[in-house]
Amino acid sequence: MRKLKLHGFNNLTKSLSFCIYDICYAKTKADRDSYIAYIDEQYNATRLTEILSETCSIIGANILNIARQDYDPKGASVTILISEEPIAVKLMDSTENPELLPDSVVAHLDKSHICVHTYPESHPDDGICTFRVDIEVSTCGVISPLNALNYLIYKLESDIVTMDYRVRGFTRDINGVKYYIDHEISSIQNYVAEEIQSQYHMIDVNIFQENLFHTKMMLKEFDLNEYLFNTTAEELSETEKREVTRLLKKEIQEIYYGRNLPDL
């Protein structure tokens, strides 16, 4: 779209929300506990802060403040407040503040924010473990959260991704005419790299007149070894391989379609 001369600041809010899932099979309770501990360490608040800080760099945002928290017994959260324009160093706060949140870091932006929450969990009986990461990148002005889309999908090694993008509010030009979106978009898929698209089944549900866009992604290839924790397919009997494969595929399809499915 052509550049518009605005009456004031661009008041449109652009929000990109992810649910990203990693799924595996851990045979024993001890294995499941080890998986949860492994995930909790791999995606602790410190590493999540690094990922979100890089996200800020990619979309061209400036970090004003960071808040992060690791939880007991599991999970972590990070929130970053960001701004579009460069901020004087003396006005920026990117340091940890133990008095605010013990073992936590918080990042704040003057126009926008980025936040992440993790949810590692396991089935009590059948060995299926599912790790979910919720991410929201919300911006105002000309910076776009869509620029970080491929980085986040790649960085979190996703089996399943559900994404929602919405543009809210309006902004005015110098003649007082309201604009409810400032860029062309027909699908989130338009912003997904071809290399990533080739690896996933993808479905859209879009409400164009409301500037609401939804995309779901599920990996096409299924390699059993990629879904096993503390074991390999070669260590399983043929019967075990069939059953574990069935359980994993059922979990993947249930999450992708958003409903419980009958046993096959």
Image (cartoon, grey):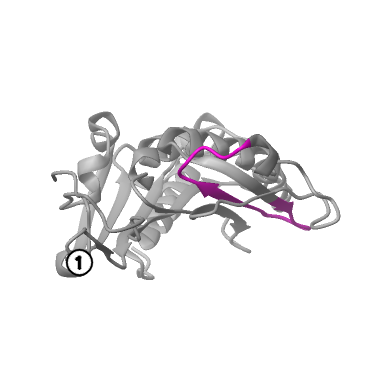
Q: Residue at x 48, y 38 (%)?
A: 55
Q: Residue at x 83, y 54 (%)?
A: 102
Pick the residue in front: 128 or 166: 166
Residue highlighted by disc 1? 176
As drawn, 126 above or below 219? below
Pick the residue in front: 24 or 189: 189
| Quadrant holding the N terminus | top left
Q: Residue at x 25, y 49 (%)?
A: 188
Badge 1 crowding class, 10 Å Cα cut-off, few under 14, some 14 to 19, many 20 or more, is: few
Residue 212 location, x and y as percent? 25, 64
Whether residue 156 can be seen here: no
Query: Residue placed farthest to the right in the image?
Result: 99
| Quadrant holding the C terminus | bottom left
Q: Residue at x 78, y 58 (%)?
A: 72
Instruction: Report the side of 244 relative to 229 (left or right).
Output: left
Instruction: Report the side of 249 relative to 81 (left or right).
Output: left
As drawn, 237 above or below 172? above
Residue 75 quadrant: bottom right
Question: Any magenta on residue 116?
Answer: no
Q: Amino acid at mark 1?
A: Gly
Instruction: Report the side of 103 relative to 233 (left or right).
Output: right
Question: Any magenta on residue 80?
Answer: yes
The magenta-colored residue range is 68-88
Residue 221 location, x and y as percent? 31, 37
Residue 122 location, x and y as percent? 61, 58
Q: Secondary structure at mark 1?
A: loop
Whether residue 256 can be seen here: yes
